[in-house]
Amino acid sequence: MNFKNDLKAALDSASPSEEKLTELRLRLNEEAQKKERRFGDRRLFAVSCTALILAFAISLLSAIPLLMRNGGTYSSPKKLSTVKSYMSLYTHLSSLNGRGKGDGYIIFTESSDSALDVNTSVDPSSPSPEYESPEHSDTNVQTEGVMEGDVVKTDGRYIYVLSTNSFFSEKKVSLTIIAVNGDGTTEKVSSLSFPVKTEEAFTEYCEMYLLGDVLAITVSENLYDKDSFHNGYYYGRYNSHKSVTLLYDISDRAEPSFIGKYSQAGHQQTTRLKNGILYTVSVYSLPNTQLKANEPETYVPYTETDGQKKLFGADCIYISEYSNEAYYTVVTALDVKKGEFISETSVLGSVADIYMSSDNIYLTKYVYENIQIGEGFERAETAVKTLITKISTEGGVLTATASATVNGTVNDRFSLDEYKGFLRIVTTELSQGILSNGLYILDKGLNTVGSIENIAETERVYSVRFDGDICYFVTFRQIDPLFAADLSVPTSPKILSALKIPGFSTYMQKYGENKLVGIGFEDGKVKLSMFNTEDKTDVFQEAVTYFDSYMSEANYDPHAFFADEELGLIGFPINISDTSDLYYMATEYVLLSYDKEKCEFIPVATLPTEQADSGVRGIRIDGYFYVVTETSVTTFDLTVFEKISALEF
Amino acid sequence: MAELLTAKSTPAQVVNKYARTVYRLAYSHLGSKEDAEDVMQDVFMTFIRKKPVFNSEEHEKAWFLKVTVNKTRSLANAAWRKRRGEMAPDIPSQDTDPAPDVLAAVLRLPPKYRTVVELFYYEDLPIRQICAVTGASENAVKTQLSRARDMLRDILGKETEI
């Protein structure tokens, strides 16, 4: 049988009833007439797609009256409280059954935090003293000092490759350790494989971290609902999810040995490593079973160390203003060297984007507005606000300290940034059908102290990057303005310049002191831009180049983006597809150098790979550049830009 | 090819062009005729209220698919919440809804996989457009498709060409 043809035939026969279609046409007619009466004939103009570069500055003063005018609209931050007891939690969760989003603020009294004994005197992330590792690149991270996991890691002497489930192959997940020799050649040292499917779970292997001689692999386990098996068929429901960290001792690279398995309730969202402590954020939706008041394990999040389950205390479960969903956002701190959880916390409600600064984890969550649609319809319609919850990580102890809302929603984690104790956040707001963007500055207690609103009406934010007192962000409809905002006075941010160019950047990072490199799209092609930011009031695009590709992994995952200003080198994978064959996909790694004098990108090398999936990375160790895929390492000599060796594993 | 919809398009034109597309996508996720019709109504109400302006056929279709995915998710979430207390399994009843075998197999997949399968196999959308419609990363979409294929083979038999 051919699945595709059969599915087409089956769905072709699935049609709404004629009766329903007639009713729908009538209803739409009514609604259209109502709308015309309300708004008159509102004409819409298409924006012409011309390239235009302009720069303007909004005076310091304009932001202050704006804030004062809008002062009353900012909700003041809420102090977060923990639940009083499991019983009060149970009562709250029971009340949520079948209830929509929007209101339901329940006040619980605060209880004291448990004091945890945390050893912070040593920094275990510093390299082992026995050897000096060669100079090498590391995973491209958002916050300096806060490590992010990835599928390829290096310590300068070895390359570690986590081959996750490849799309087109039936290959198992494996970890391969590759030794890097001084002459740029490489050899495989060892390989470990992991099961993807077992009788209990479907396992997703996410990312890795290196901490001296300990390697951590982060994993999401999707546990089957036993009742979902019927006549040997799986009826499509996971009972629950676990976010897992597997620790391996790799002091003998030829024979990694398993240290332990550390789990927490919920599907893994993201992880970060700082000072030897691995922070994991997961979202725990309650399992598909009846909640039982006297059995807290049916509704309380947990951690699990080598099979030993430990329920969160009521003092680790926070309730926020919008905790009216039966989800928990679960955050834990795992001491990697000791192999034990040292702190945990959770907030009722789910999470959208997560940003970690040096000292805090910020969770964002959309707040939806219910719009009445016709009789008897009430639907969560549009996300109108962002709820920010701040969790302190001081000394490895997780404490939810405050929450607050700002208007609009964030683009991604790069839309948030903490600097000198202030949280800065760029959002896009949809109000009465019109898009606009806002920049907010919040103090330590999450009080909004400064803001600029109504930036670039009808456009939305596509990328944001903060650089100390300056914030750069790109909005787009058909032409792409790059804004530079000065945030040096938190109470009065000001727009310094706006550059309009075709296309938009989806990711930007600093390139040396006075440049910003951005990867994005224009006319369906991947584009790479170099912006000159020397004069913040006159930011301009000094170079641009295009690639014959519809997408680069770096468009959505900065870990795939390599940029080293000292070497003058930029690299990333691009996806190549053959439009005549839907199934054909491959990746090419492109390496460019940037000529600062001529303001030009110069192609250095293009390496085709067989890898259809994401996960191709470029790393630099001493004078060599390595392109790493799930099955190969190719070495380029950086002095002559020539391919010198290739290893298949 | 049909004309692009504009602010001047009549509701009948809009419905004729997209009702079936919207319905199929919602149905393949929800497995219920009534729920799919609810989503369909909701999507078109949103269209009438927002009057989005499209610059291409592709953009127009992507808008309808994306809004359908969002509305379907909201409904599925709400329905799931209501039903959880009763431990109702998410299996379409064979008595009231005799879906052909492949469709029944798709409806046995975890909810998020169903949408991706419909978009890929029925709408023939390339991965990057599925990303745009579902808001998932390319990696996630590929993983979901790959897992869905594994599961579909488990359900329909190893020899099935998927």
Image: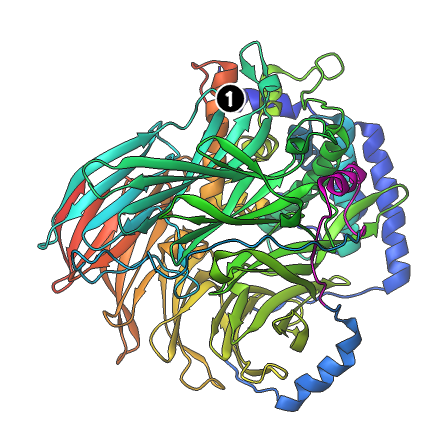
| Chain under callout 1 | B
Q: Which residues are magenta?
A: A77-105
- Image point (15%, 62%), residue name: A623
Q: Given the image, on which type of amino acid does mark 1 rest?
A: Leu
Q: Is residue A97 magenta?
A: yes
Residue extending furthest top? Answer: A231
Number of residues whose C-alpha sits closer than 10 Å to that of mark 1, classed few (under 14), some (14–19) or many (20 or more) = many
Tally of numbered tags: 1
Question: x%, y% of residue A385?
Answer: 70, 60
- Image point (52%, 56%), residue name: A397
- Image point (75%, 47%), residue name: A324
Under circle 1, the secondary element is helix
- Regarding residue A629, the answer to whether it shows in the image is no
Residue under circle 1?
B152
Please state if A69 lies on the left or on the right of A451 as rendered: right
Q: Nearer the viewer, residue A153 or A36?
A: A153
Q: Is residue B109 magenta?
A: no
Q: Image quadrant for the N terminus of chain B?
A: top right
